[in-house]
Amino acid sequence: SLNCVEWSLLPPATKEMVVLAGKLKGRFQGDPSFEYDYTEINAEDAERLLEDGKEPIIKEETRLVATIEQIDSAVGIVPRGAFVKTPLGSVHENRNFEGLSLMEAKKLSSYFHFTEPVNLKNKTLLEKADLDPSVDFLDSLEHDIPQGSWTVQLEKGGTVVVLRSLLWLGLTFYHVPVTKQYGYVYFGTGEKNLDLPFML
Amino acid sequence: HGPYQPHEPGYGLYQPGYSPYDDQIPDPESRMLAIQNAKAYLLKSSTTSGLNLYDHLANMLTKILDEQPTNAVDIIENISKDVKCAQFRKKMDTLRDEHEILPTTEAAEVRKALFLKTNAEGDEELEEEIGETPLPNVMETAFYFEQAGIGLSKDESYHIFLALKKLISAQPIQTCRFWGKILGLEMNYIIAEVQFQEGEEEEETEEEEVIEEGEKEMDEFEDTDEEKEKDEPPKSTYKPPPVIPKEENGTGANKYVYFVCNEPGKPWVKLPPVTPAQIVCARKIKKFFTGRLDAPIVSFPPFPGNEAKDEEEEGGRDTYEENPDFQPPSVAEMVDSLSLWVHHSQSILPQGRCVWFNPSQKSEEEEEDEEEEKSEEADKPQQEVGPSLLTPLSEDEEIENLPAWTARLSTDLIPEHAVAILQSNRWPGAYTFASGRKFENIYFGWGHKYSLENHSPELPPPVQAEYPSGPEITETSDPTLEEELAFKAAQEEALAASEEEEEEEEDAEDDEEEDD
C-alpha cells in the first residue's frame, strides 16, 4: 500500500525472483510498476532471456516481494520458546510462552531465525545434548556471520530489549521481557548492507 | 539429700532407681512435684536463642531414633549441634529477602536526577531568563516530526528535553539544539549542538597554545641533539604532507560545539573540535559507532584520534548539509515562499526544490584544502571556493540519478495543516520539517553516508622500493687471510724492489759523481 488506505496483494516470491532481484542495486522508486532495465546488469543473462522470448525487465513489485522474502529469511527472528515443534513435526505458537527473563533477553543465543535451520546439524553432539528438541529446532543468532551483526540494547530503563540488525539496516526486533510481547519491523531503504565486514 | 536440684552440677546424671540415695526417696507427692518442676524447668525458653531444652532434647532423640546412627553416644554433641542449626535456619526464614537491584531501578535512579529541580537559586534566574532561553522546545519539534512519522517515543523526547535543560544550566550556552541520535553497537549517542556564549571558549584555546609551545620546545631540544651527532644516517626525503591546522573554534566546520551523552540522565561529554585531516580520513572509512566515546577506531587509513573525533566530524558535516543558514531569511521571503508552497503544492514537490532550505556547504571548502601544492610558502592553504552559502537544495549534487533530497507533504488530506518534510538521500536518516515559520532538522540513524557502490577501503600504498643497490653501498666480502698475506707479501716485494731500484739509482748517481 502506498497510503495505508488502499492495499494490494503482492504475488508470492519464487526463487528466481529472489535471485534476479538480488542483482539490482539502488533505491526503490516508490512505484510498483516501475520497470528496471535488466540489460545493464548482466549482458549475458539478458541475451539468454531474449532468446527465450522474455524481455529483460524487472518490475518493482517483483523486487519488492523478493526483498521482503530476503529480509524475512535472513533476519526474521523470534525469541526462544515462542514456537514449539510437536513430535509429528508441525510447528506452532507456544501458548505457554511467558517471555524471556531479563538475563536471557540480553543474550543473543535466546533468539532464533524463523526459517529452515541451516546450522543445526553442524552442532557437536555435546551441544545437541543440551538442546530441547521441542524448542531448539531453529538456528540461533549466536553463530551469525559476521560476528557482531546484531546489536542488543535495553531501552526505556531496561524494560524493553531491542535488537537491531546491521546486515539489513532498519530491521528492528523488540521484546518486553517476562511478557508475551515481541515482534519485528523493517523501516529502511530495502538494501542489504554489503559493507558490513568493513564496518565492524 | 533428695534428688539433686537442677542448678546443681550432676543433676541429670543420676537415674531414679540407681541413685545412691534411693533409700531416701521422698514420698510420691513430692516426687510428682519434683517431676513437674523439672519439666517446667526444661520447658523454660532460653533468653538468647528462644529454644527450650525440653523441645531440643525431644527433637534430638527423635532424630536419633529416626536415623539410628552407629555409636550415637559418641556423636551426640554433633547431633545436638545439627538440631540446633536446623532450628536456626527456620528462624531465618522469617527475615525478608534482600531485593535484587534490578537494572530497571538503576536506570530509573539515573533519570530521576533529571526530574529533580536544581537548587533554589536557579529559580530566580529563571524568571529573568524566561524571555530568551536557549533551550529548544524539543516536544514541539517532536510533535512535528511525529506528523512525518519520524521520531522518538514521547518518553524519550521528554527525557532528552530535561537533559538538555540540565546541560544548559551547567554550561554557558547561547544556542542549543537537539541534533539527533546516532545508533551504535553497544550504546547510542544523543547529540546536542551548542553554541557557546562569546568569550567562553578562550580557556580551551589557551590550553592548546600551551600544548603547542610545549611541542615546540621539544622540537628545539631534538634539533640540538641531532646536531651533536655525527655521521647521521642519510636523511629520508619523505616529508609528511604539511599538517593542516584545524580551524579555530567558532568558525567553519567547528562552528558548533557538540555535546554527547549515551542516555538522558547521564552526564554530557563535550566533543573536541575536529581537524581537516580527520574529516578527510573519516570519509574514507565506513564503520559503525560502538557507543563508547573512547573506543579507538581500527581502520585504514589510520584514523587520528578516536571515536569522539569521528563523532564530531560526522556532526559537523551533517549539519552543514542540511542546516538552514545562520542568517535566517527575512520573514517576508518566507511568507512568500510559503504562499508559493501552498499554491503550488503539487508542482513543487516533484521538483524537489524548496528555496528556503539552504544548506551551507562550507565543510566542502575546508576539505579541499589538502589538495594544495606543496610549496615552502604554503603556510596558508589555498581556499577553494565551494558553493556559496545559500544555495538552493535543488542544486545539490545528485547521487546517480537520485535527487539529493526527497520532499513530501505529511498528509494529503488536510493540506492547510500539512507539514513539509524533506528526507536526505545522501545521509539517510536526516530529516527536515517545515511548517509556517517553524523549521527544524534532525538526524536519527547509524551515521553513514549513502553510496550505491559498495565501499571499498583504500588499499595500502605499494610496498616502498628499497634503495637501489649500486656499487657504493654493496658490501664487498672481506678478504680472507690468505689473500691478505699474499697481498702483504706482494707489497713487500714491491717495496723491496723499489728500494733496490733506488739503491741502484743512488749507486748510479754516485758512480756518475765519481766519474765527474
Image (cartoon, rainbow, N blue to C red):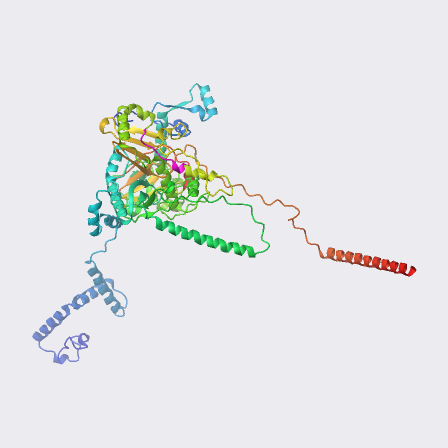
Place of residue A192 in the rendered image (x, y in percent of width and height, measured from the top left): 39, 34
Q: Main secondary structure of the magenta part?
A: loop
* Residue A140 appears in the picture as rendered: no
Q: Residue furthest front?
A: B516
* Residue pictured at 27% horizontal, 70% vertical: B74
Residue B359 among magenta residues: yes
* Residue pictured at 46% horizontal, 54% vertical: B217
Place of residue B227 in the rendered image (x, y in percent of width and height, measured from the top left): 55, 55
* Residue A120 appears in the picture as rendered: yes
Place of residue B405 in the rendered image (x, y in percent of width and height, measured from the top left): 35, 30
Q: Residue furthest right?
A: B515
Quick check: A169 above or below B121? Answer: above
Res B176 → quadrant: top left
- Quadrant, the C terminus of chain B: bottom right
The number of numbered discs placed on residues in the rendered structure image is 0
Quick check: B391 above or below B263? Answer: above
Viewer-proximal residue among B286 and B434: B434
Quick check: A193 above or below B171? Answer: above
- From the viewer's perspective, tell me whether residue B206 is left or right of residue B408: right
Viewer-proximal residue among B120 and A168: B120
Q: Residue furthest top?
A: A53
Quick check: B455 above or below B22? Answer: above
Residue B355 among magenta residues: yes
Place of residue B31 in the rendered image (x, y in percent of width and height, measured from the top left): 10, 74
Res B195 → quadrant: top left
Viewer-proximal residue among A55 and B287: B287
* Residue pictured at 24% horizontal, 26% vertical: B415
Write down the region rendered in magenta: B354-364
- Quadrant, the N terminus of chain B: bottom left
Res A68 → quadrant: top left
